[in-house]
């Protein structure tokens, strides 16, 4: 079967604004789960997941931790500045997006203001990152006590909610825009498929004989970057840091040996595992762009939320379970008023057979 040439428009769909979830479900595992593993989709609740997996399967979670990476302040002139820290570097330096009416010159100091009006910490601009033409800016974050950037962000920063969530961050977001097993700080967006897991579901999975392993991918703001070219091959993917630890590599090998399936929790776990398989590198930066026709080497089953129209994540899902099946599932979800995006519902998918990308 010849591979269809997909364009950006192929991944568009009309989503009623009312289906964009602004708040999480009352209970993590109370979200809906669309079982798309069969030709006819089935409507379930997320806590049904253990019954849909098999003893010997391996769930692979992304254990990244969302940091309170959104910072507000002002220049010496009084002009307002918003920073979104993308990556913490060495020497109390960070790489950040900067929103400001007129960009300050290197050496300028921005007085930052905490959530409750606290002052006394600052960001000093050093230049662009990762080089002189980079799209990010390199700052030193500091206060008189000598705290490191993670401490400063946790104390003074805001939860970096996605652009389609319209309310300011709250205590609910600080808890619920974070997985229950978040470990490694560094993400500015949550691995949202994992938000549905709570301890009762994890206990039920363990009792069923489903095993667990973790990878790390620090999700960057680029995950929300729109694709602007109709020819999707011209899109430049953002870069994110990942790690596949030795214990997880061994768990995958053991799963294969016993005939189990590798179940990726979220597209970030997919990108991590397939980056490792493609490059042979257990850690590093990845710009992997998964579109229909991609040859998956590791992931057999995917748990994922519903994604934005024309997004790279829609392309990844279409590559994984087939374009026609993906679009049919989205039509079913919209008709059934599933909740979309980060705080929305989830679906369970199996990898397509080779040659079934259309």
Image (tube, rainbow, N blue to C red):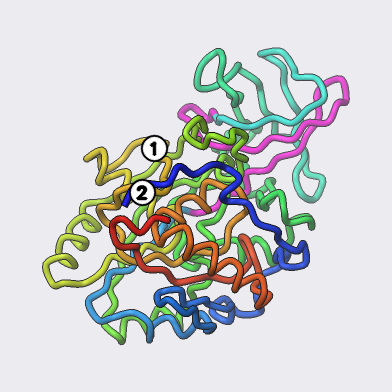
For this orientation, the residue located farthest to the front is 1
Q: Is residue 351 left or right of residue 309?
A: left
**Label 1 neighbour load within 10 Å: few <14, some 14-19, many 20+:** some
Q: Which contiguous range is marked in magenta?
A: 65-93
Residue 68: in magenta span: yes
> Residue drawn 52% across and 84% down?
44
Residue 217 lies, in percent from the top left, at 42, 48
Q: Among all residues in the image, which is located at the extreme left?
A: 257
Residue 252 locus on image (x, y percent): 21, 61
Element at label 2: helix
Tell me if residue 328 comes above or below residue 222 in the rendering: below
Task: Say if 32 sits above or below 136 in the image.
Answer: below
Residue highlighted by disc 1: 286
Quarter holding residue 78 = top right
Question: What residue is drawn where x is 60% and y is 16%?
Answer: 127
Check whether the beta carbons of the residues at disc 2 and disc 1 lie within 8 A of each other: yes
Reply above or below: 159 against 75. Answer: below
Give the side of residue 95 with respect to residue 351, left or right. Answer: right
Residue 254 falls in which quadrant of the image? bottom left
Across the whole image, how many numbered discs are drawn on residues? 2
The residue tagged with tag 1: helix, strand or loop? strand
Q: Earlier in the sequence, mark 2 or mark 1?
A: 2
In the rendered view, would you say 173 is above or below 66?
A: below
**Other residues around mark 2 within 10 Å, as few (<14) / some (14–19) / many (≥20):** many
x 83%, y 31%: residue: 80
Viewer-nearest residue: 258 or 332? 332
* Residue identifier under label 2: 272
Q: Residue at x 50, y 63 (%)?
A: 326
Q: Is residue 91 left or right of residue 105?
A: left
- Front residue of 127/297: it is 297
Residue nearest the viewer, comparing 251 with 54:
54
Q: Can you give x and y, in whole percent of width and height, for residue 8 in the image?
A: 57, 42
């Amino acid at each position: 079967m010849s591979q269809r040439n997909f364009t950006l428009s192929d991944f568009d769909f009309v989503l009623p604004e009312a289906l964009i979830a602004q708040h999480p479900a009352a209970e993590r595992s109370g979200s809906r789960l669309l079982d798309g593993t069969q030709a006819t989709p089935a409507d379930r609740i997320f806590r049904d997941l253990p019954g849909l997996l098999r003893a010997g399967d391996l769930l692979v979670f992304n254990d990244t931790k969302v940091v309170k990476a959104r910072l507000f302040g002002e220049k010496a002139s009084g002009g307002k500045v918003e920073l979104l820290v993308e990556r913490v570097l060495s020497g109390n330096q960070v790489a950040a997006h900067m929103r400001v009416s007129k960009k300050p010159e290197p050496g300028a100091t921005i007085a930052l203001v905490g959530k409750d009006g606290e002052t006394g910490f600052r960001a000093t601009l050093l230049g662009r990152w990762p080089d002189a033409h980079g799209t990010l800016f390199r700052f030193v974050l500091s206060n008189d006590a000598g705290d490191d950037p993670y401490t400063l962000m946790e104390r003074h920063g805001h939860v970096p909610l996605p652009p389609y969530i319209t309310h300011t961050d709250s205590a609910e977001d600080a808890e619920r825009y974070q997985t229950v097993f978040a470990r490694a700080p560094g993400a500015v967006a949550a691995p949202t498929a994992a938000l549905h897991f709570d301890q009762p579901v994890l206990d039920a999975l363990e009792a069923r004989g489903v095993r667990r392993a973790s990878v790390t991918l620090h999700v960057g703001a680029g995950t929300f970057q729109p694709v602007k070219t109709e020819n999707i091959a011209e899109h430049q993917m953002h870069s994110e840091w990942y790690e596949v630890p030795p214990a997880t590599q061994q768990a995958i090998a053991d799963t294969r040996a016993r005939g189990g399936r590798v179940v990726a929790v979220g597209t970030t776990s997919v990108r991590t595992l397939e980056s490792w398989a493609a490059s042979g590198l257990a850690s590093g930066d990845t710009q992997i762009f998964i579109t229909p026709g991609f040859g998956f080497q590791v992931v057999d089953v995917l748990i994922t939320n519903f994604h934005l129209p024309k997004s790279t994540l829609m392309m990844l899902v279409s590559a994984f379970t087939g374009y026609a099946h993906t679009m049919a599932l989205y039509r079913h979800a919209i008709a059934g008023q599933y909740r979309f995006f980060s705080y929305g519902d989830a679906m369970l998918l199996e990898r397509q057979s080779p040659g079934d990308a259309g």
